[in-house]
Image: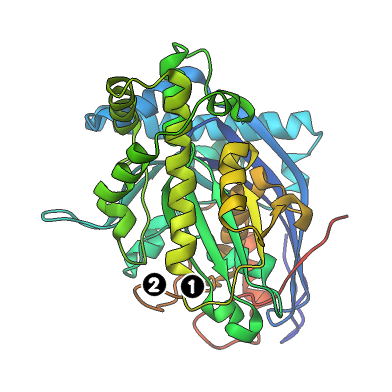
Amino acid sequence: MTISLPENMANPLNLSVIGLNSGTSMDSVDIVLCRFKQDDPASPLHLQLVLYDEMPMPVDLKNRVLRLIRDNESSPEELSQVNVQLGITFADATTAFCKKHDINLKSEIDLVASHGQTIWYVSNPGPDQTKSVLTMAEGAYIAQKLSKTVVSDFRISEQSVGRQGAPMIAFFDGLLLAHPTKMRICQNIGGIANSCFIPPESAGGLDKIFDFDNGPGNIFIDAAMRHFTDGQMEYDVDGEWGKKGTADEEMVANFLENESYFKRALPKTTGRELFGDGVSIGLIEEGLRRGLSKYDIIATITRITAQAIVNDYNRFGAGLPPIDELYLCGGGAHNPNIVNYIQQSFPNLKILPLSITGIPGGAKEAVTFAFQGLEAILGRPLIIPDRVENKVPVVVGKVTPGPNYRKLQAVSSNYGINYEDDYLPPVRKLIIDKE
């Protein structure tokens, strides 16, 4: 097919993108179908979340990956195998998603954007270390099995210019929640908890947003639940176990005081490398030595998460307007022992579910990777947050061409036909189309 374009006349953008993600807890493959529309690069970007679902992660593969991360011992053979197995799993999950929701993958989808599964992460290298991240789910396998162009491996692009490569969420939270007068925070409580501060426009707005990892979110709680139930329970449903116990405040304070991560300045990010199952087991053993019940231990570990978040609001919110609204997402948003503690610590704070914006909390990360995949194809960098190492622009992700790659190239070239700069300007206005 020959594509004929009028000279110097760019067509409006209209692309449908599937976003894929598996988080720290590896509960599932999160899948979204997003439709992006934009009249021209200077106009607001319209985003419609068409569909969101969670497809099961094979238990054997999940356990293999978690063991690989926990033990930090492997071989080139195993890494090669796991990378391909994850790629096949993500592709199969996408096929199942499309079949379940009656989506014609060939005719209705333009692009697949896959974050994959983070295996190892070095954001603050020590002696003889290099800043790096290993994210797996081979894009070539996804592209071939789905016959679509794939963008993957986003975080290493950020690290290549000297930044940490995570949380990489401020650009989206800022666009979604920026307000003329209200100070807002978006709080994700997944395996790892992370915060994005979004000052009002009167205090800098999008130019002053910043994000960082607080530390453990659900990761310790989940590990402790697996321990106490012999693997029968993966998490503390509705915080029921934590409600039955009493937090050991001294144990909480000691942990937060002795772990240097909590004292680190921004930017900072972390993962299972620092807050893995081994640390959780250590906390369980300490709690048992102190005479705590299993419920007390769950309450104590839960309080560590909540107290770390509260401490960060006080520490990094200094000098900013008082927090007006907190938007919650991630599995921990459903744990009242965390949410109620935050509310008690900030009585005037209005706590809201992120879903009221039109983006369900469970879908957000996959949506952000669909967004990043779109920008990779267009040659458009993300908004760079404040309080990071530098402001060097970069287009994130690695592109694996599929059969529709030349068509996407034509769309991208035509869309930026009137721009002579190296990159298109970052999106500064986002509109969520709810229907």
Q: Quadrant of residue 279?
A: top left
The answer, for residue 399, to whether it is visible in the render is no
Task: Residue at 34%, 73% (x, y): give it.
Answer: 389
- Closest to the observer, 419 or 82: 82
- Closest to the observer, 412 or 82: 82
Q: Secondary structure at mark 1?
A: loop
Give the vertical position of 281 relative to 252 (above or below).
Answer: above
Task: Residue at 56%, 72% (x, y): give it.
Answer: 380
* Amino acid bearing label 1: Pro
| Few, some or many residues within 10 Å of mark 1 (<14, 14–19, 20+) | many
The answer, for residue 338, to whether it is visible in the render is yes
The picture places residue 186, in percent across and down from the top left corner, at: 60, 59
The picture places residue 435, in percent across and down from the top left corner, at: 88, 55
Task: Residue at 64%, 38% (x, y): give it.
Answer: 334
The picture places residue 150, in percent across and down from the top left corner, at: 55, 49
Q: Viewed as shown, does residue 57 lie left or right of 427? A: left
* Amino acid bearing label 2: Val
Q: Are marks 2 and 1 in contact (CB under 8 Å)?
A: yes
| Few, some or many residues within 10 Å of mark 2 (<14, 14–19, 20+) | some
Give the vertical position of 103 relative to 229 (above or below).
Answer: below
Q: Which residue is mark 1?
A: 385
The picture places residue 321, in percent across and down from the top left corner, at: 58, 77
Q: Viewed as shown, does residue 225 lie left or right of 363? A: left
Q: Secondary structure at mark 2?
A: loop
In the picture, the quarter occupied by the N terminus is bottom right
- Closest to the observer, 218 or 424: 218
Q: Which residue is mark 2?
A: 388
Give the vertical position of 63 relative to 119 (above or below).
Answer: above
Q: How is the image coloured?
A: rainbow
